[in-house]
Image: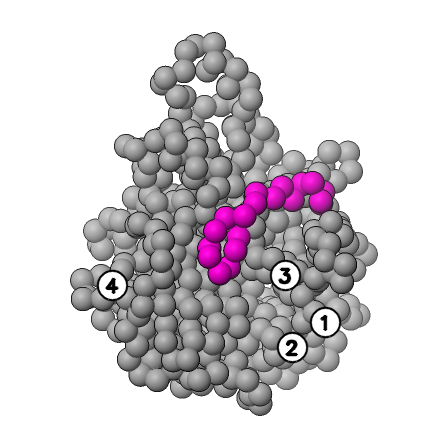
């Protein structure tokens, strides 16, 4: 799609709440080929930042490409210059054999295509992906301000695009790193809130705990983690980054990040809260892929962890090549039938490990179990909160400011039908009841929850989602739903089509 130099007005139907004033910022891919070279994977398109401004019942829409090195150099040379997640760079045909030889030894450059999310650190906003590069942006103009290398501040190879935030603005995140003896490990990091002296909070960021990788040269892929009042919850999944493949890919033309992943068929899933992990107890369960934690909290001596999982060790990203998603509907359905199947699960981790053998979970409201084995491991079985064949409840959101790390009732998610987003779902995690918003030919995005000011109930607020409706007179709109009833409050339609967006932030 083209970027917009000026915001365009939207046609509002319904009535927007008068208190709803702010900007919805979202990230996603916007450019799927450069010259005659296509990007191959859903996560490869060049990062486009979208913004809906809401003020006094009126709405405008704007978008701009991040002016990353990946984007600017691709535009300049009219070819893919930096290897993306699933798209390789090939040698520049214009270069002679000597300069090709030297660029070979310079290796593959790490991408700064920050296509996944955007969020605040201190008083600044950053677009992010999962490498060590983040991009400072102006949330008003959507201009790109600065490429920032996290390695300058923290001992990490990259961090997730899903940090957690404390009410004061402290940011927590986790990433792979090199630990002792060149083994791989995971570092949990903290970035403090805005500083009184106006200095950059990144300068004061630090590693607060390190967890060893269960396989020395193969750390697990991490997309998000859980945070309760007192605990981090880290799920070590069987999708592994093979460091040896990674290092060789660095010198082999045509290799991508996707080529460095492999599945461990026997490890299942390991869990860690640092205290239990370091004392030798390991929580374990059967294999699944995990991208998004919904919420986690402590209750009566247990940690309750709600997750969107995909069953098995086969990597779900293998099914997200653009060729898969662009196929005929029958082909899309066949591919999704072969892929790991989605489920929303609740796991419960006992903090007191007292007797071997029997179920240690005595929380009255869950059927999840945990059994301590004689070897010190604790085997977990989940309670299923939502399960329908090839229908995922994904891109979960909660009333974050009120409920993060606390007992809660409601999760909101994007309904994926064979990987295609076609509905918004509200899930009551206590009763398992669901409400659904769906409309013909409409493809929504992750619904972000915005609470009504002064709200006293958990679901008093609205959900914001960008919806694509190809073929309509105005093919894209911002949808505003009543979060309690999941009914439409208003929509703001624009004369523009949007590509998919992944994650974003509502800035009041
Ligand atoms: Fe994500």
Q: Earlier in the sequence, mark 1 or mark 4?
A: 1
Residue at image mark 4: 495
Alpha-carbon distance for marks 1 and 2?
A: 8 Å
- Confirm or deny contact between disc 4 and disc 2 (CB under 8 A): no
Alpha-carbon distance for marks 1 and 4?
A: 45 Å
Question: Which of the 4 quarters of the picture holds residue 481?
Answer: bottom left
Residue 315: say if magenta. Answer: no
- Confirm or deny contact between disc 1 and disc 2 (CB under 8 A): yes
Please report the bounds of the magenta region as a residue range.
137-155
Q: Earlier in the sequence, mark 1 or mark 2?
A: 1
Closer to us: mark 4 or mark 2?
A: 4
Q: Secondary structure at mark 1?
A: loop
Q: Is residue 63 left or right of residue 302?
A: left
Alpha-carbon distance for marks 3 and 4?
A: 33 Å
Q: Is residue 80 left or right of residue 216?
A: left
Crowdedness of circle 4 by 10 Å Cα count: few (<14), some, many (20+)? some
Respond yes or no on whether mark 1 lies under 8 Å from ligand 1: no
Residue at image mark 1: 229
Residue at image mark 2: 406
Residue 146: say if magenta. Answer: yes
Q: Earlier in the sequence, mark 1 or mark 3?
A: 3
Picture residue at 41% right of the left edge, 58% below the top: 50
| Colouring scheme applied when the structure was drawn | one colour
Seen as rendered, the residue at the extreme bottom is 456
Alpha-carbon distance for marks 2 and 3?
A: 26 Å
Alpha-carbon distance for marks 1 and 3?
A: 24 Å
Residue 79 x, y percent position in the rendering: 36, 30
Can the viewer see residue 277 in this picture? no
Q: Earlier in the sequence, mark 2 or mark 3?
A: 3
Crowdedness of circle 1 by 10 Å Cα count: few (<14), some, many (20+)? few
């Amino acid at each position: 799609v083209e970027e917009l130099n000026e915001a365009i007005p939207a046609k509002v139907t319904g009535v927007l709440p008068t208190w709803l004033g702010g900007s919805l910022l979202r990230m996603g891919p916007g450019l799927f080929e450069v010259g005659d070279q296509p990007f191959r994977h859903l996560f490869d398109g060049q990062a486009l930042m979208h913004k809906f401004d809401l003020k006094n019942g009126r709405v405008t829409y704007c978008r701009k490409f991040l002016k990353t090195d990946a984007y600017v150099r691709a535009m300049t040379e009219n070819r893919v210059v930096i290897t993306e997640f699933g798209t390789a760079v090939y040698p520049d045909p214009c270069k002679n054999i000597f300069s090709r030889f030297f660029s070979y030894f310079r290796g593959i450059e790490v991408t700064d295509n920050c296509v996944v999310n955007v969020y605040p650190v201190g008083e600044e906003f950053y677009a992010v992906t999962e490498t060590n590069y983040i991009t400072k942006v102006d949330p008003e103009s959507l201009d790109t301000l600065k490429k920032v290398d996290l390695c300058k501040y923290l001992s990490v190879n990259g961090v997730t695009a899903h940090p957690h935030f404390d009410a004061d603005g402290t940011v927590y995140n986790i990433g792979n790193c090199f630990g002792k003896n060149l083994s791989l490990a995971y570092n949990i990091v903290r970035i403090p809130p805005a500083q009184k002296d106006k200095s950059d909070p990144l300068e004061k960021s630090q590693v607060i705990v390190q967890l060893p990788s269960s396989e020395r040269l193969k750390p697990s892929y991490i997309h998000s983690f859980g945070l309760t009042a007192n605990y981090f919850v880290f799920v070590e999944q069987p999708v592994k980054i093979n460091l040896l493949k990674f290092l060789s890919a660095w010198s082999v033309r045509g290799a991508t990040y996707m080529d460095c992943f492999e599945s461990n068929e026997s490890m299942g899933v390991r869990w860690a809260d640092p205290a239990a992990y370091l004392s030798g107890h390991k929580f374990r369960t059967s294999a699944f892929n995990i991208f998004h934690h919904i919420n986690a909290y402590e209750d009566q001596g247990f940690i309750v962890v709600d997750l969107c999982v995909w069953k098995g060790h086969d990597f779900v990203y293998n099914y997200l090549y653009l060729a898969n998603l662009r196929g005929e509907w029958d082909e899309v359905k066949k591919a999704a039938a072969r892929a790991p199947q989605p489920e929303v699960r609740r796991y419960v981790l006992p903090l007191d490990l007292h007797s071997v053998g029997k179920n240690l979970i005595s929380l009255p409201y869950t059927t999840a179990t945990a059994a301590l084995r004689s070897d010190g491991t604790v085997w977990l079985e989940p309670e299923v909160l939502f399960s329908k064949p090839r229908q995922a409840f994904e891109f979960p959101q909660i009333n974050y400011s009120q409920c993060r790390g606390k007992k809660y009732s409601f999760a909101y998610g994007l309904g994926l039908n064979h990987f295609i987003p076609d509905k918004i779902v509200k899930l009551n995690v206590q009763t398992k009841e669901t409400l659904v918003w769906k409309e013909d030919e409409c493809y929504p995005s992750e619904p972000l929850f915005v609470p009504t000011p002064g709200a006293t109930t958990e679901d008093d607020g609205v959900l914001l989602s960008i919806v694509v409706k190809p073929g309509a007179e105005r093919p894209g709109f911002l949808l505003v739903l009543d979060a309690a009833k999941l009914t439409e409050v208003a929509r703001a339609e624009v004369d523009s089509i949007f590509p998919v967006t992944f994650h974003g932030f509502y800035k009041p």
